[in-house]
Image (tube, rainbow, N blue to C red):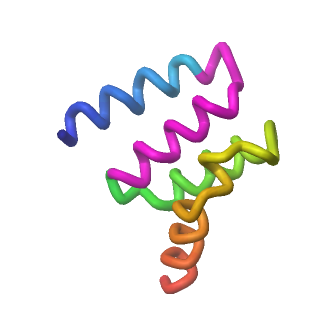
Amino acid sequence: MEGRNGDAVSLLERYLKDWADESLHAKLAQVFAATNMLQDSLSHYQAALRINPQNEAATADGPKHIETTLSLF
């Protein structure tokens, strides 16, 4: 599973170079969250929200949970 997440990160980052799309940022945030890379995840959720403040994935409970978890450290 970890290798597949790495492949997903590489692919999504490559696409983001050409298309700064909120859905790509949200998907990358989800992959980072799944691999416990919370700071990277939060950064991409925030990027998705800068592009579209109404992005459903970036306004869901996941980003709030990540912010809460990061505040504990």
Of 26 and 61, the residue lying toward us: 61
Of 34 and 16, the residue lying toward us: 34
Q: Is residue 43 left or right of residue 47?
A: left
Q: Residue at x 70, y 51 (%)?
A: 46
User: 49 above or below 17?
Assistant: below
Q: Residue at x 80, y 37 (%)?
A: 51
List x then y, in percent, for residue 23: 62, 32
Q: Quadrant of residue 59?
A: bottom right
Q: Quadrant of residue 21?
A: top right
Residue 25: in magenta span: yes
User: 16 above or below 39?
Assistant: above
Q: Residue at x 66, y 46 (%)?
A: 56
In this picture, which residue range is highlighted in magenta?
16-34
List x then y, in percent, for residue 11: 43, 21
List x then y, in percent, for residue 22: 69, 33
Q: Is residue 66 left or right of residue 53?
A: left
User: 46 above or below 3?
Assistant: below
User: 1 above or below 71?
Assistant: above
